[in-house]
Image (cartoon, helix red, strand yellow):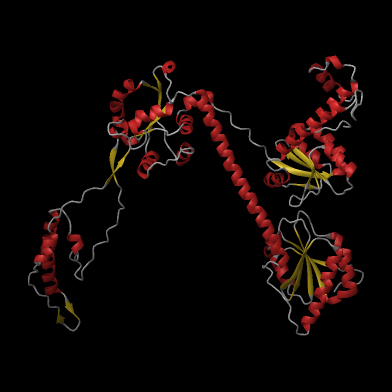
């Protein structure tokens, strides 16, 4: 109980599992404000909670604030900024509410107080364990999970599409720069004989070796090599490529000026003959270099030999006698003799309790005719082999191009297609739209760090809807529509720290905490087609303005009259020399140009 003159704490602070476990066992209705450390508890509701306790609850209701970051029972609420109210009675959760809606929270507290009073008189009430989700929580979870699953699906498709586009661009680039280079891959087991076999084929085929490499393959290289091919290396060929060093030829026609055939068909015919595909025609180099490779067998561990009572090895089993070597028969007879001698020794020396002697028959062991028959040497099993190709050629132009890129760096590097510029780490940062002038001034100071921006209905990524992509369109929206609470959201690069520090001082309403969060948030605010749609709409708008300009009488000026003299002079240089006196029409051109750039003439 608080001392006289000391303020009574309305909400108990819960920071550990022990404090949580102790508090939820208290009697009455417990209303707990669950919060994350970065956002803090909902202090705006304190006055309402105090009023309810004084007027209705009294000792039957107790309040607390619980930090989800340090309480394991509340792990699922971590990182959330929305106020979360959990109602607990007798250690169980009886209800849950989201948000800072005063009337709704008041009604829910009064309703739960009535249920708590009824429960004291024996009436049952619905309750669940703290770790279980409430109905509203389950609905939100399912919606969020569906959104996340869809995001992952879209992101996976985007990455796969990016891989396809990049490899297609590389293949087309190689084919455009070195169209008359072919590739022949020599498998490791064929390398010792390949020079002698191919020697007689080069000149008649009008082919020459332009370069040789000895690549080492990995699963990643093979996956990229066969990306466009409807072909997979057989198991033994794949195993051979992954375990050993291979050899590859890049070939070209002797006389490129006189060569008018399809390069892929030409090389395929050289390697496989008339069939132009594996395993090749009978007299083709592919057939001459094929090899029979033994199929590996699983090695089985033999059990340790059993030991007899006398300490000697037991007789071999029938399966052990089935050995194809004649040496085993002599070992068998030797084992029999040793066993007889040991039996006689045991009979003469060992005794059992009670002075009773162990009687062991000294009658020599006789091996039956059946046993001897089994021990006879049997015919050796033939080793199982499999036929493996010695050569391989890419089956299509794109695969040939990727083979040149992967296997012949000295050919590809001088003509390499530049790698796409990686997207820098970035965050999403939002401001009240009413502060747009101040924010845009800072944006103009750091144009290289502003990746995208737009005006949205809210700064919450999950619920935000796009209002306008440019300042000009937003000004039109404000002129025609009454709306409040709109936000200016910026995709801000974190490659440099200075812009982030400056924007942070402008009191943002929302900001991603890490680049990882920023990537997720920006993909929601600014999807993949965000810029493309704007480009299309701007082109349409520009054309409509040009049509309207032709219909207007000369001298009718736009809103940004005489504001951008440099663009005005540029329009004159492009063919308006004969219309220097028509000032209004040229200014309409300036307005259209500014509109296409997303700049308002008033700016």
- Residue 256, image x, y percentages: 43, 18
Does residue 347 appear to the left or right of 39 in the view shown?
Answer: left
Residue 548 picture quarter: top right
Q: Residue furthest left?
A: 363
Residue under the point 84% across and 66% down: 104
Instruction: State whether residue 586 is above or below residue 305.
Output: above
Q: Please identify the residue farthest to the front as the structure is shown.
A: 551
Question: Is the N terminus in the top left, top right, bottom left or bottom right quadrant?
Answer: bottom right
- Is residue 88 toward the left or the right of residue 326 in the image? right
Query: At x 7% / y 72%, what residue is drawn?
Result: 363
Q: Which residue lies furthest to the top in this view?
A: 578
Tell me: residue 323, above or below residue 513.
below
Q: Nearer the viewer, residue 296 or 186?
A: 186
**In this figure, what is the number of numbered marks?**
0
Residue 440: percent from the left, percent from the top? 83, 36
Residue 536 in sight here: yes
The x, y position of residue 80, in whole percent, is 74, 56
Name the quadrant of the C terminus. top right
Residue for point 89% across, 43% down? 480
Task: Judge whether 546 appears above or below 234 on screen.
Answer: above
- Depth order, front residue of 140/594: 594
Depth check: 404 or 341 in front? 404
**Quarter of the rendering containing residue 207:** top left
Say above or below: 199 vs 531: above
Q: Indicate left or right for 499 with 4 as reference.
A: left
Residue 314 lies, in percent from the top left, at 19, 66
Q: Image quadrant of residue 217? A: top left
Residue 70 in view: no
């Amino acid at each position: 109980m608080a001392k006289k003159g000391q303020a009574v704490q309305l909400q108990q602070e819960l920071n550990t599992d022990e404090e949580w476990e102790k508090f939820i066992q208290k009697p009455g209705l417990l209303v707990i404000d669950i919060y994350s450390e970065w956002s803090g508890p909902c202090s705006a509701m304190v006055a309402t909670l105090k009023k309810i306790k004084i007027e209705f609850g009294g000792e039957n209701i107790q309040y607390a604030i619980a930090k989800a970051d340090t309480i394991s029972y509340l792990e699922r609420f971590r990182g959330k900024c929305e106020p979360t109210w959990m109602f607990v009675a007798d250690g169980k959760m009886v209800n849950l509410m989201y948000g800072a809606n005063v009337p709704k929270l008041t009604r829910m507290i009064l309703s739960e107080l009535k249920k708590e009073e009824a429960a004291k008189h024996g009436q049952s009430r619905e309750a669940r364990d703290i770790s279980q989700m409430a109905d509203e929580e389950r609905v939100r979870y399912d919606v969020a999970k569906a959104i996340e699953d869809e995001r992952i699906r879209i992101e996976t498709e985007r990455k796969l599409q990016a891989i396809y586009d990049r490899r297609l661009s590389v293949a087309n680039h190689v084919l455009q720069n070195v169209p008359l280079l072919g590739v022949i891959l020599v498998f490791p087991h064929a390398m010792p004989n390949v020079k002698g076999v191919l020697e007689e084929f080069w000149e008649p085929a009008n082919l020459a070796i332009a370069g040789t490499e000895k690549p080492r393959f990995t699963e990643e290289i093979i996956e990229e090599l066969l990306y466009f091919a409807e072909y997979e290396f057989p198991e033994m060929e794949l195993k051979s490529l992954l375990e050993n060093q291979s050899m590859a030829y890049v070939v070209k026609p002797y006389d490129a000026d006189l060569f008018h055939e399809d390069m892929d068909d030409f090389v395929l015919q050289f390697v496989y003959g008339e069939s132009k595909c594996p395993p090749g025609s009978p007299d083709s180099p592919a057939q001459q270099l094929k090899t029979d490779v033994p199929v590996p067998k699983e090695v089985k561990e033999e059990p340790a030999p059993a030991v007899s009572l006398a300490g000697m090895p037991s007789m071999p089993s029938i399966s052990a006698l089935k050995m194809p070597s004649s040496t085993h028969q002599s070992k068998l007879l030797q084992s029999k003799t040793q066993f007889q001698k040991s039996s006689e020794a045991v009979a003469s020396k060992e005794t059992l309790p009670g002075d009773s002697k162990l009687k062991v028959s000294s009658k020599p062991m006789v091996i039956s005719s059946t046993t001897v028959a089994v021990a006879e040497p049997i015919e050796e099993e033939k080793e199982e082999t499999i036929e493996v190709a010695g050569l391989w050629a890419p089956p299509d132009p794109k695969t040939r191009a990727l083979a040149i890129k992967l296997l012949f760096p000295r050919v590809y590097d001088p003509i390499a297609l530049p790698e796409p510029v990686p997207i820098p780490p970035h965050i999403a940062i939002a401001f009240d739209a009413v502060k747009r002038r101040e924010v845009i001034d800072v944006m103009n100071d750091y144009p290289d760090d502003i990746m995208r921006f737009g005006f949205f209905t809210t700064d919450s990524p999950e619920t935000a809807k796009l209002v306008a992509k440019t300042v000009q369109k937003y000004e039109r929206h404000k002129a025609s529509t009454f709306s409040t609470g709109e936000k200016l959201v910026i995709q801000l690069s974190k490659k440099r720290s200075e812009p982030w520090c400056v924007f942070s001082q402008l009191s943002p309403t929302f900001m991603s905490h890490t680049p990882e969060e920023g990537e997720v948030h920006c993909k929601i605010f600014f999807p993949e087609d965000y810029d493309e749609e704007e480009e299309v709409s701007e082109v349409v708008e520009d054309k409509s303005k040009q049509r309207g300009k032709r219909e207007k009488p000369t001298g009718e000026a736009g809103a940004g009259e005489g504001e951008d003299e440099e663009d005005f002079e540029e329009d004159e240089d492009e063919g308006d020399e004969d219309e220097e006196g028509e000032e209004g029409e040229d200014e309409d051109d300036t307005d259209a140009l500014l509109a296409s750039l997303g700049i308002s003439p008033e700016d």
